[in-house]
């Protein structure tokens, strides 16, 4: 299928980073349109972006049928539209585990640390920078320690064999956030190893924030 996807994107958004990785793994070309989330700009809250994406978040994909947000739904759409290479393992039990791993990050970590939530804690409850940093690290560490305690032990370089899945696609951007905010990773060595192995792959390297950085 010949098609170029338009992606509403921001270089530092971990949710958009997931979609960039998946599109690269599938070798699907995309045009990135920056929605500047920087606190001094907050373009995602502008009326013009709200008219495009009522959720006022990135990522979103613009298709001829409309604009659609939510990175995990977009990842599934990508996998269903371009089935090769698959983003999930073959066996149902491993698919369950890969999805659960990904959702620990996409449902239990990232939503608590997104700018909208941090802004509310700051403005409504008066949290200072130390409090915000502690909050941020708390949710990453709680999720990461759970993932580390239950890492799959099958053969292969990655979590579920010799190819990355939804699990790694969500892990690597969250590890980026953890490093960016100096979260202690010394007791999650398995996650650190998987992250490093993934970042060696061209599809992950090309999607990295430093590789797609906009001013
Ligand atoms: N569940 C959404 C989360 C999207 C999300 O929170 N994106 C962040 C950037 S990583 C965002 O746009 N935040 C804007 C805000 O918090 O106001 C998804 O997976 O796409």
Image (cartoon, helix red, strand yellow):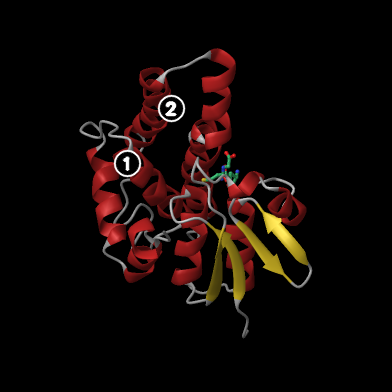
**In this view, the mark in front (1 or 2):** 1
Q: Position of residue 69 (x, y in %)?
A: 66, 53
In the depicted structure, whether residue 197 falls above or below residue 14: below
Which image quadrant: the N terminus?
bottom right
Q: Can you say whether 90 is above or below 56 in the image?
A: below
Q: Can residue 86 be seen in the rendering of this structure?
A: no
**Residue 27, image x, y percentages:** 47, 77
Indicate the quadrant of ligand 1 in the picture: top right
Label 1 – label 2 distance at C-alpha: 15 Å
Q: Is residue 162 left or right of residue 70?
A: left
Instruction: Please name whichever residue, 44 or 30, is drawn nearer the observer in this view of the structure.
Output: 44
Q: Residue beneath label 2, please? A: 139
Q: Secondary structure at mark 1?
A: helix
Element type at mark 2: helix
Q: Which residue is mark 1?
A: 180
Assess disc 1: are there few (<14), some (14-19) or many (≥20) residues with their C-alpha within 10 Å of its C-alpha. few
Mark 1–mark 2 CB contact (< 8 Å): no
Q: Position of residue 155 (x, y in %)?
A: 29, 56
| Residue appearing at x 37%, y 34% in the figure | 144
Quarter of the image where the C terminus is located = bottom left
- The reply to whether residue 23 is visible in this rendering is yes
What residue lies at 29% left-to-right and 59% top-to-bottom? 199
Please tell me which residue lies in front, 66 or 74: 66
The one nearer the camera, 33 or 64, is 33
- How would you rate the neighbour count of disc 2 (Cα within 10 Å): few for under 14, some for 14-19, many for 20 or more? some
Furthest toward the top, the residue is 125
Whether 169 is drawn above or below 147: the answer is: below
Q: Height in image: 33 above or below 166?
A: below
């Amino acid at each position: 299928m010949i098609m170029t996807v338009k992606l509403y994107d921001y270089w530092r958004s971990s949710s958009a980073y997931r979609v960039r990785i998946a599109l690269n793994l599938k070798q699907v070309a995309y045009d990135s349109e920056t929605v500047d989330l920087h606190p001094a700009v907050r373009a995602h809250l502008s009326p013009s972006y709200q008219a495009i994406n009522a959720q006022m978040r990135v990522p979103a994909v613009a298709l001829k049928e409309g604009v659609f947000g939510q990175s995990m739904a977009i990842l599934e759409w990508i996998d269903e539209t371009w089935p090769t290479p698959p983003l999930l393992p073959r066996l149902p039990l491993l698919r369950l585990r890969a999805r659960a791993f990904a959702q620990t990050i996409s449902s239990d970590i990232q939503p608590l640390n997104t700018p909208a939530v941090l802004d509310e804690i700051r403005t409504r409850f008066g949290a200072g920078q130390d409090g915000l940093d502690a909050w941020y690290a708390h949710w990453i560490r709680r999720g990461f320690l759970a993932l580390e305690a239950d890492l799959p032990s099958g053969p292969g370089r990655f979590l579920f064999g010799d190819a990355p899945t939804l699990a790694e696609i969500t892990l690597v951007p969250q590890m980026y956030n953890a490093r960016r905010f100096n979260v202690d990773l010394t007791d999650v060595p398995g996650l650190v190893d998987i992250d490093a192995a993934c970042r060696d792959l061209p599809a992950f390297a090309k999607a990295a924030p430093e590789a797609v950085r906009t001013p």
